[in-house]
Every structure is written in C-alpha cells, then in structure tokens.
Amino acid sequence: MGFFGKKKITDGLSKSRVGFWGNIANTLLGSEIDDDTYEDLEEQLVLADTGADVAVQLVDSLRDRVKKNHLRTGPQALDALKDLVAEELECDHEMDLSGKPAVILVIGVNGVGKTTSIAKLSNYYKEQGKRVMLAAGDTFRAAAGEQLDIWAERAGVPIIRGADGADPAAVIFDAVQSASAKGVDLVICDTAGRLHNKKNLMDELSKISRSVKKAAPEASVETLLVLDAITGQNAIRQAQEFIAAAGATGVILTKLDGTAKGGCVVAVKQKMGLPVRFVGVGEGIDDLVPFSAQAFADGLLGKED
C-alpha cells in the first residue's frame, strides 16, 4: 500500500483514534501494566465494538505477550496491542482476479453503500490500468440501476443493464459474455440488496455464479460483502447471514470515517474468517482504499497529531 492509501486510512480513522480507541491507548499509556489495566482494557475494547469474545481474546493475548517479552511500560504494551490487532486482521492471500475476465459479485443489504462502493471499486481498478465493466444485477430495486448508471458515467466505465425486474443472472451473463468478447479485464456486478431468505439468496447467487461460468469458462469469481461500519455488532449478524447464504469471500467496510468505534473490523475477521479487502473512508469516488492490517492498527492506536 502506498503513502496516500495509508494516509487515507489514518485520516479516516480520526474519530476512532480520538474516541474509543483513544481511550484504549490512554488506558495503556497512563498506568502500570497490572490486572486493573487488563480489566479496564477489556471493557474499553467491548465499548469500541470488538464484541466481548474478541475483547477477551485480545487481552489474553496481550497478557501473554507482555509476560513472554518482559514488557514493562505502557508504550511497549500499546505497541504489542497494535501488533496483535494487525495480526488478527492479516490475510495470507490476495483476491483472485486472474480470470478472463475477473468477476466481482457485490452483495449486502440496502443502505450500506453497496452501489457507491461498486462505483468506487470500478474507479480504483480503472486507475490501476484495468478495463472495467459494470453489471446492474440489482434489478428488483428500480433506483439501483439508475444510480449505478450515474456512477458509471462519473467513473467513465461501460455498464450493462436489463429491464426492471429482469433475471439478475441473465443480466450478469450478458455483461460477462460482452466483457469476454471485448477483452475487458474486470466485471463488477451489483446484486440484489435484500436478504429475503437464505434459500432464495443462495439459489439466486448460485445461479449467477453458474451464469458467469457459462458466459466465460475462464472467469474467476470473488464475492464481496459490503458492511456498514457504523452498524457495529449488527454488521457481524449481517455477515453471518450472508456467509451462510452466499459464500462471501471478503468484505468491503464502508463509512469507517463516520464511526468512533471501528472494532467491528476485528470482530468480522476473527469471528467470520473473512478478510477485509477495502474500506470506505469518505464520500469521494477515490475514497475506497485497499485494506492494510498494519495501517489500520496504526490508525486506530497511533498518536493523534
């Protein structure tokens, strides 16, 4: 990750850094490392939206590391906690965009920033030199296609749309087939933004995945779940539902700049096993940035200038 990406994450986390996570840093910096410190730290982590299980695990790991490495001071313990948060969030594999074309299916409930995230993703990959196409597969919500049209124009990428109420798999089939014929590198697909029920969602996304392979046998598929950081632990419940129904492979976390908590990022990765791939840190089209575990940990627990 480049300097500007790290800076965007750091700037986007300013509310968290001076809020709940600032309290966590102050808990470690302002006292001796003893049982009371660990108790206070656990409470602060829960307040920062990590969830109780994750808070207990982080504190236990910190206690072990302090003992093992003979740490004595608050700043040493804070650095150790930063490392632990970063380690929790690390992912040992990149997204698979090797297909011809690569396909990203974007899922998530309405209102989390799914459509704008798709537009920002398209801008990001276009800036990386890829030829990008959008597919408006959320055909159940009339405004979704129109909104994506506007964003596609802003990003300067082509879009494939069907009629309102059209079969999403058919729309995405047409887009992938067109992309394959035209040598497009990446197709980013909007999908229905509603969790009607697990079986219907699973059936719909399975059908879409089959249609992708039918349209282009050499295609690769990633499924990114969009979650709203402001919803905190509700984001965990959404993730559980969508993973059970849709087999998500990663997370886009939006509105990270709008919350003072931010701990749900750690909880999503630890509880769900899903890597965070991108974070939204602003309203602009270039304000979706690739996730860096170390930059995130530093941004949460670093010193506010």
Image (cartoon, grey):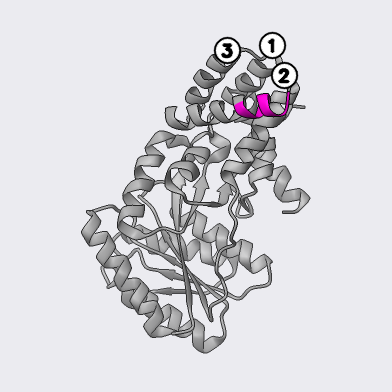
Residue type, mark 3 in image = Asp
The residue where tag 3 is placed is 35
The three-letter code of the residue at mark 1 reads Glu
At mark 3, the secondary structure is helix
Q: Earlier in the sequence, mark 3 or mark 2?
A: 3
Q: Is residue 45 left or right of residue 67?
A: left
Q: Can residue 154 be seen in this snapshot?
A: no
Identify whether 90 is placed above or below 245: above
Magenta stretch containing residue 76, yes or no? no
Q: Residue at x 75, y 53 (%)?
A: 2
- Can you tell which quarter of the image residue 24 is in? top right
Residue at 29 percent across and 72 percent down: it is 207
Return the residue at label 1.
32
Mark 2 Cα shell of 10 Å, populated few (<14), some (14-19), many (≥20): some
Depth check, front residue: 181 or 92: 92
- Number of the label disc, if any, that sits on residue 49: none
Say which residue label 2 marks. Answer: 74
The mark nearer the N terminus, 2 or 1, is 1
Q: Residue at x 50, y 28 (%)?
A: 55
> Of 182 and 100, which appears nearest the observer?
100
Spatial separation of the CA atoms under disc 3 and disc 2: 13 Å
Q: Which percent across, then down, holds residue 144? A: 38, 59
Provide residue 191's location: percent of width, then percent of height: 37, 63
Distance Cα–Cα, label 2 vs label 1: 7 Å
Residue lying at 61% horizontally and 28% vertically, measured from the top left: 64
Magenta span of residues? 64-70
Q: What's the distance in space between the residues labelled 1 and 3, CA to CA? A: 9 Å
Q: Secondary structure at mark 2?
A: helix
**Counting other residues with Cα less than 10 Å from the Cα at mark 1, is it few (<14), some (14-19), or many (20 or more)?**
few
